[in-house]
């Protein structure tokens, strides 16, 4: 659970009035959100709400149209190795010629810096991470020959190998069998117990209150944030899932077309 | 006569031409591997064409074909192609492949027009640019430590060493950004810069190959060996190694074959590379056509053997005689079952055949029992699926199924399910 931080200690993650636009069209409006660890933090919202975009904006993968994001009180560039990222599984080509072990070893690259090759210590770490997600026996397999749940666990193992303090996971439970879901949740819980903050984009409401300590409800703007039990109220959910928010949607299109709304 | 030539004074010439083809192919395979695994082969195609105006302009400004300025001109033209494609994609909203198609054909055509216009002033033959003149490479030499070395070989060799060195130095960065660009960028890698570097390297590799094999066929060296290697091995460094080997082999074999049949060396090299790819499709372990056909034939034979054993077992269960084998396949199967000690000369099951047959029939009837319990199927629909599944049930899953349906003594038709010890 998050606990109050003394004023001197900076927040783990702070979105300050963040607006994100694709082209000229805003898709996330004025997100102001502070998250502290350790804990499992869920970003919940309907399809197209901009949940993944929020993560990508924080990581500098899509440009901010306004506002700023800070990690541990600093910009991302200063603390990159402390931030791990697990993208959606479909974003990579699983026919790519790499073994499971190769992918997990990639998690150690960021700390190594330019030109240096992973050595025995990095290999040992990668093997240990594979063990933690229960994939030690398929280490040498080509990644395309794994099930969806196994592929997701490979991604998780790669993030573990990064030894970060803050993890971003984009829909880690999507298209994953029940057993893998449990395993992933167990690994995330262990990370929380080790004092890490884990921010998870998630679409399934039923499991949300069970998995997350705190959540943020997002639909193009921040609707509510706080302890899961307090935020996931019927009223808030109604506001989140009531359908596209017409005003923001129409306004966004008008901005993109350089016009005025009707 | 030809053999005499090769062994005589022109042997050195041929060897230099072959060495040039090999080293060009090796350089192309290095960048080609990265292009193919990133699904960017088409961009390699585009760049190999679009560098032409860069080369022509460099020559017009006084550069020597195969010299440093020509390499620079080619890289500039390649980067221009990539940038223009990006502008068309992001600024105008054109799809990326259509944008690349427009840009590279236009630039290539511009190069062709420039060459023809300036034909009288520069030493650059359009047909040479398109098809290469590997056969003439040994005649343009540079004295190096007392040895006459063809310029084209030197350029291509230097480019190959640079590419190999760069790839070795940046291996983990290239691997991470090729596999998962988003995660690599989040970890702080300059993914866009690495991609631009790869495209500039593509321009270098193709220009080095221009003189030898021409603008059109150099694409074959870029894409085909890497595509074939990807079928054969499944880790990036192995793909690159095999691609280099296949490219070099194609260069050597292609040149010798062209010399034998007295035809275009560049054309023959590309044909040989195509044959290599076809062989990879045919022979690739696991997924190749032959491997799959072999696996299918193996299954068909096992099914035929198991079916025959089960037929015999059921006949003996009912105290009857099994029908004689009539087809060629079942006769072969009976011969083999007899030879391997599973059935006796009169067709009766021997102990080994008895055990195996019982397991097949047990699988069959257990599956019927499982379907009868879990699927809403009429009794007469249970047999066909069980007839198929019986060949795929192993002891572990059989045990779980038996437990699931409560270790029944009989199947839904009332027949006894044989035990498994």
Image: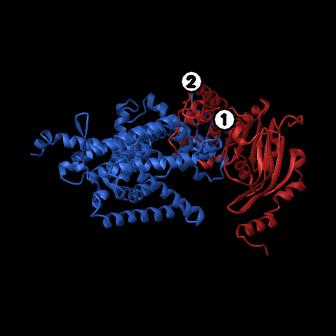
Chain colours: A red, B blue
Residue A201 place in picture, x, y as percent: 74, 47
Q: Is residue A47 visible?
A: no
Mark sitting on residue B403: 1
From mark 1 to mark 2, how far is it between C-alphas? 46 Å
Callout 1: 10 Å neighbours few (<14), some, many (20+)? few
**Quadrant of the image occupied by residue B151:** top left
Can I make out residue B68 in this image?
yes
Q: Secondary structure at mark 2?
A: helix
| Residue under the image location 37 percent in, 52 percent down | B70
Q: Which mark is residue A141?
A: none
Residue B377 image position (x, y, % from top left): 63, 53
Which quadrant: the N terminus of chain B?
top left
- Chain for disc number 2: A
Question: Is A110 on the left or on the right of B56, as rendered?
Answer: right
For this rendering, which residue is in front, B31 or B237?
B31
- Tell which subunit mark 1 falls on: B
Q: Residue B376's x, y, as percent?
A: 66, 52
All told, the count of numbered labels is: 2
| Circle number at residue A120 | 2
Q: Residue B9: horizontal and vertical position, in percent?
A: 13, 40
- The residue depicted at 61 percent of the width and 49 percent of the height is A91
Q: Is B93 placed left or right of B82 in the picture?
A: right
At a point 66% along the width and 35% down the height, the residue shown is B403
């Amino acid at each position: 659970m998050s606990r109050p931080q003394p004023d001197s200690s900076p927040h783990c993650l702070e979105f300050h009035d963040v607006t994100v636009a694709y082209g000229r069209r805003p898709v996330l409006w004025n997100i102001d959100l502070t998250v502290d660890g350790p804990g499992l933090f869920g970003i919940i919202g309907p399809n197209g709400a901009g949940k993944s975009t929020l993560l990508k904006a924080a990581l500098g993968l899509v440009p901010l149209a306004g506002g700023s994001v800070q990690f541990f009180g600093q910009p991302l560039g200063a603390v990159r190795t402390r931030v791990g990222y697990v993208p959606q599984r479909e974003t990579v080509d699983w026919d790519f010629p790499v073994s499971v072990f190769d992918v997990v070893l990639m998690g150690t690259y960021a700390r190594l810096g330019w030109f240096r090759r992973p050595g025995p210590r990095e290999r040992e770490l990668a093997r240990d991470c594979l063990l933690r997600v229960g994939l030690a026996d398929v280490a040498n397999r080509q990644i395309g020959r794994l099930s969806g749940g196994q592929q997701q666990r490979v991604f998780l193992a790669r993030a573990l190998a990064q030894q970060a303090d803050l993890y971003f996971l984009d829909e880690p439970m999507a298209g994953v069998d029940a057993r893998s879901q449990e395993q992933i949740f167990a690994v995330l819980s262990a990370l929380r117990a080790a004092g890490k903050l884990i921010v998870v984009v998630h679409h399934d409401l039923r499991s949300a209150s069970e998995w997350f300590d705190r959540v943020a409800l997002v639909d193009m703007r921040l609707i509510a944030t706080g302890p899961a039990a307090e935020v996931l109220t019927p009223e808030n959910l109604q506001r989140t899932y009531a359908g596209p928010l017409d005003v923001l949607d129409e306004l966004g299109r008008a901005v993109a077309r350089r016009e005025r709304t009707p | 006569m030809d053999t005499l030539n090769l062994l005589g004074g022109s042997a050195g010439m041929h060897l230099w031409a072959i060495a040039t083809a090999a080293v060009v192919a090796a350089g192309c395979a290095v960048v080609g591997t990265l292009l193919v695994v990133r699904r960017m082969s088409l961009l390699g195609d585009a760049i190999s064409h679009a560098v032409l105006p860069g080369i022509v302009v460099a020559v017009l400004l006084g550069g020597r074909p195969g010299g440093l300025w020509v390499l620079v001109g080619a890289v500039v033209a390649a980067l221009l192609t990539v940038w223009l494609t990006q502008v068309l994609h992001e600024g105008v909203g054109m799809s990326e492949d259509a944008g690349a198609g427009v840009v590279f054909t236009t630039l290539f055509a511009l190069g062709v027009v420039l060459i023809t216009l300036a034909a009288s002033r520069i030493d650059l033959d359009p047909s040479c640019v398109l098809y290469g003149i590997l056969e003439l490479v040994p005649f343009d030499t540079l004295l190096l430590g007392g040895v006459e070395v063809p310029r084209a070989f030197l350029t291509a060799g230097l480019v190959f060493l640079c590419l190999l060195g760069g790839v070795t130095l940046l291996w983990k960065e290239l691997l991470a950004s090729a596999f998962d660009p988003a995660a690599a960028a989040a970890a702080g890698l300059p993914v866009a810069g690495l991609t631009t570097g790869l495209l500039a390297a593509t321009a270098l590799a193709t220009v080095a190959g221009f003189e030898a094999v021409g603008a059109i066929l150099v694409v074959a060296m870029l894409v085909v060996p890497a595509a074939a290697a990807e079928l054969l091995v499944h880790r990036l460094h192995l793909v690159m190694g095999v691609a280099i080997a296949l490219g070099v082999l194609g260069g050597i074999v292609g040149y010798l074959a062209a010399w034998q049949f007295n035809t275009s060396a560049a054309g023959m090299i590309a044909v040989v590379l195509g044959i290599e790819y076809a062989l990879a499709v045919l022979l690739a372990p696991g997924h190749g056509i032959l491997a799959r056909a072999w696996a299918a034939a193996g299954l068909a034979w096992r099914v035929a053997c198991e079916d025959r054993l089960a037929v015999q077992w059921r006949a003996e269960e009912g105290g009857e005689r099994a029908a004689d084998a009539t087809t060629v396949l079942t006769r072969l199967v009976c011969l083999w079952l007899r030879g391997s000690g599973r059935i006796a000369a009169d067709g009766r099951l021997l102990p080994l055949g008895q055990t195996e047959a019982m397991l097949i029939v047990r699988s069959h009837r257990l599956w019927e029992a499982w379907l009868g319990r879990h699927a809403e199927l009429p009794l007469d629909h249970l047999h066909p699926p069980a007839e198929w599944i019986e060949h795929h049930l192993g002891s572990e899953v059989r045990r779980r199924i038996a437990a699931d349906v409560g270790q029944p003594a009989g199947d839904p038709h009332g027949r006894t399910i044989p035990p498994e010890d």
